[in-house]
Image (tube, helix red, strand yellow):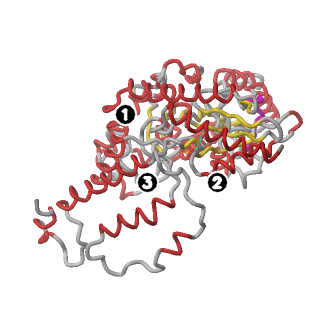
Amino acid sequence: MPHPSSHSGHDRGPTEPASNTPADLPHLAQQAAAFLADYLTSLERRPVLPEPHPGRLLERLPSLPPEVPEADPWAAIYEDLDRLIVPGLTHWQSPRFFGYFPCNHSVPAIVAELLSAGLNVNAMLWATSPAATELEQRTLDWFAHAFGLPESFTFAATNAGGCIQGTASEATLAALCAARHRARAAARARGRTTVHLTLYTSEQAHSSVTKAAMIAGLADGPEDRTHLRLIPTDPAGAILAEALGQSVRADLAGGLVPAFATLTVGTTGTEAVDSIAACVRALDDAARAFGHERFPGWVHVDAAFTGAALVCPEFRRFFSGIERADSVCINPHKWLLTNFDCDLFWTRDRAALTGALSITPEYLRTASDAADVVNYRDWQVPLGRRFRALKLWLVLRCFGLSGLREHIRGHVACAERFESLVRADPRFEITAPRTTSLVCFRLCGEDGRSERLLSELNAERHVLLSHTRLPSGPGGTPGRYTLRCAIGATLTRQRHIDETWAHITRAADRVLRHSA
Ligand SMILES: Cc1ncc(COP(=O)(O)O)c(C=O)c1O
């Protein structure tokens, strides 16, 4: 068969590269797909981590960009990918990747990314691609149903609905902007022109909450507590609802305006779950003591990782009380077979969100403004937006909710197995209760042992785990060092757990021999 581009050379402009006509696409996409299929298959035998050589790629890349197109670049590009790029990657899709939280992929989602790149629409307004907006609305409603969210978060409600944000950090920032908008509007309505807003989250919340405060001008840096309160947690890492209530009371007593509380369902450190119901009760009680009907601020629930598990009814208890939240976010790109990036964000108060983020210069006015359409540019920080709903649509159609449940339950079973292996070895201890698929553990004894164990494992590069510190103890004593085994990579199966445990115990033998 002749190369497809040979049919269409006449379509090419004089300065265009040798592979930029639609007819070039099938062959080149097939080549890329074959490369990726080989890559994903190879992950079973590759080390997870690259060799640590800072500057190695920089040394090998020319310092100036190509001035003219390469005549036939593709063979050289794939050679360079193999030789220069892939060896410098951390293989997040490896079945032995257990660090941080996972970053899922699936073949349908990869194909959806390709389709989205090819269609390459900018769905900033409904009018700039109605189907992209409406597919997003419908898939967000589907996922609300999948997670058991109340209808009050969906487009069936008059002032609610969901959208895709790039990341959970962006979702939290959007929620904070909406909260600030609503709190200031309420204060203005009471005749107050200047208000001191206060924000609450736990000491174990993700750093993106503090960062959102920094971006929103409500913290001058990570340590600034002028507006932000970090509430202590129990030893497992869940916020102390009573301490949250006390903090709100103290601020109300001082004439401040509690505006935003972020609760975490699945903390990054230990996957601890804040009790939404208990926290809302504590917030309401505090507010009632000062004459409010209930907590007037915005409650945001960050369920970036653990929220994925709610496709399984047995985990829905983590959202008990969610009907009182103003917004919630969950990342399918972490654990629901959907390629990065894709955070799902729902709010029950669209008007506050769009009130905070909407601005309409003349060049963005369209005839559809008068109609009741959703313009997603008003729900996020950037104007432009990719067609990411395609990923959700293809994932749901190809796996169904039953496939997603199987995916989650398979990894939870892997985590149960890993936990039982840890418990059966008296040299180790489990350091936090397991919520779904994150197992926190360490070598018994001084912290240095576990630190050395992690550096041994990383030096071997065969498995990747990460670490954190447990919540601080009474009187602020620093929390103990702990290892984290976060199970959820798309390709991870039970055999990888056994293999990983064998690696860990061999490395532990070496560490303990040295420290004996
Ligand atoms: C609980 C929680 N929230 C937020 C984030 C930040 O996620 P993103 O990278 O989507 O901003 C993480 C990341 O692991 C997380 O665990």
Q: Which residue is mark 1?
A: 139
Residues at discs 3 and 2 in contact (Cβ within 8 Å):
no
- What SS does tag 2 mark? helix
Please tell me whether mark 2 or mark 1 is closer to you in this view: 2
* Rendered position, 309 above or below 62: above
Mark 3 surroundings within 10 Å by alpha-carbon count, few (fewer than 14), some (14 through 19), many (20 or more) = some
In the rendered structure, which amino acid carries the disc numbered 2?
Ala
For residue 383, the mark is 3
Q: Position of residue 91 (x, y in %)?
A: 50, 50
* Rendered position, 192 above or below 248: below
In the rendered structure, which amino acid carries the disc numbered 1?
Thr
On the rendered structure, is 58 left or right of 468?
Answer: left
Q: Which residues are magenta?
A: 228-236
Q: Is residue 479 magenta?
A: no
Q: Quadrant of ligand 1?
A: top right
On the rendered structure, is 259 left or right of 65?
Answer: right
Q: Which residue is mark 2?
A: 459
